[in-house]
Image (tube, helix red, strand yellow):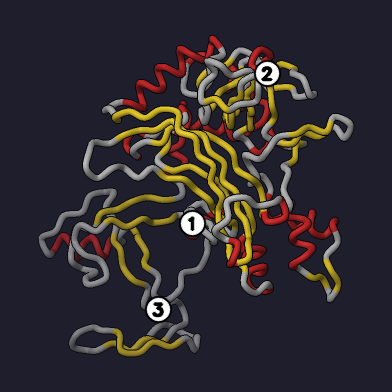
Amino acid sequence: MYPFGGNADPYFAGRVGVYLKLLQPADSGKIEVDASFSLTLRTLPTAAAGQTEHDASTQRGICFRCGMTFCDAAEAGNSVGRCEDWGAHVYPSDLLLRELEVIEGVEAMVDVELEAWDSRPSRLGASLLALYDQVQRLPLRRLRTGEVVVALSSSDSTGGFRSIDGSEYRVMRLVSADGSACFDSTRAATAFLLPTNSKAREGGTFATNEASMMRVFYEVEGDQMTARDAAAILRESSDGLFVGIEPSHDAAAGSIEWPIAVPISQLPPLASRLGLRALPTRLRYALRTRARGLLLFLLIGASPLWVGFIASQFVSAFAIPSRSMEATLQVGDVVLAEKLSSRLGLPFEVNDLVLFSPPPELQSLVTSAGGKLGSRDLFIKRVAAVAGDTVALDPFTGDVLHLCSWRLPGTID
């Protein structure tokens, strides 16, 4: 359990993370394990923390249910349902901390239900073999828990759910006709699906007790928070973060609670997100939902010369060939120069580093000293003064001894 998220992605910051991780055995080779699980965050009186059965009032946030082939990180593949660790961010961290501070003698814990279906030695290239297997299986509607599938057409199912062609769905769970869990679709009758794209989840909800707990542990202007206040804060702070809870569907209200249960017999044709069969459908979906971003991607990919030319109008890289700017710049250093300021006519400021073409007088000095300048060679120097400044120079070394910005009339002394 990670009370503050434990994830580098800022999208998950501020939510309690609960994860499972495969610990590889120390005395033998690496293994991989097919497993399904549920993870439930609870707050309990300290005396009851060792109990295994708890009622719904102790649950916090969602109960995360999923499955995965747990394996070594080198052979992981999210799309085909292979990871070293897997879990979810189930509950706001500040709500958990507030409860632990307010109620004396309470501690947080995670309930874990784990079912291992198979284990085997991990082989080199196992992730590629899993991808090959997935590409072959999905046209036959043979699924595995944890993997991501792409719907190749729109299809209605019972409960009012309509799959979206080109959209990606993660298979959260598989169950048989009698309701028992499965890891693959050999005996499964129903798949529980969750769209991987938050936009595709719009219109659906997740069964969670966060709003009710927020009303209990937060106050607004001295009064208890209303349900509307709590729901608004949840929408602002946690949109799209709830995943993997028990499914249900309220047909009367017209809203879906994710993940949705879909009979496997009613699934549309499926493909791997990494397979060629899914490419045309995924492109059409991207055009419908992210047309601008896709167009930009295609332009960048198809026109590298144009992109390079445009970029060169705003920034350029230069290598330092001499020691004239030591110790600020060393021989061999590479500097990036932005060109926008000069194109907009912005004034220079003291201490700016500037690149410039040497005037004829400076070219003559370099030539007389035995140097050689090309037509595209530039000088880089620091701005010591601008028009109107007064500068005092050391008569022996030429060092700048004094600089002020009084803007005296006339020329620089």
Q: Which mark is residue 263?
A: 2
Residue 250 found in image quarter? top right
Kindly identify the amino acid type of the residue bearing the numbered disc 3: Ala
Q: Report if the CB atoms under discs 3 and 2 are less than 8 Å apart.
A: no
Q: Where is mark 1, residue-wise?
A: 6
Between marks 3 and 1, how big is the CA–CA gap? 50 Å
Kindly identify the amino acid type of the residue bearing the numbered disc 2: Pro
How far across and how far down the image is residue 243, in percent?
63, 41
Taking the spot 76% from the left edge, 68% from the top edge, the residue there is: 218
Residue 11 in view here? no
> Height in image: 334 above or below 221?
above
Kindly identify the amino acid type of the residue bearing the numbered disc 1: Gly
Q: Nearer the viewer, residue 87 or 119?
A: 119
Taking the spot 20% from the left edge, 57% from the top edge, the residue there is: 332
Labels 2 and 1: the sequence-earlier one: 1
Residue 309 in view here? yes
Q: Where is mark 3, residue-wise?
A: 385
> Height in image: 407 above or below 119?
below
Number of other residues with Cα within 10 Å of mark 3, as a class: few under 14, some 14 to 19, many 20 or more: some
Q: Report if the CB atoms under discs 2 and 1 are less than 8 Å apart.
A: no
Foreground label between 3 and 1: 1
Residue 181 found in image quarter? top right
How far across and how far down the image is residue 288, in percent?
68, 26
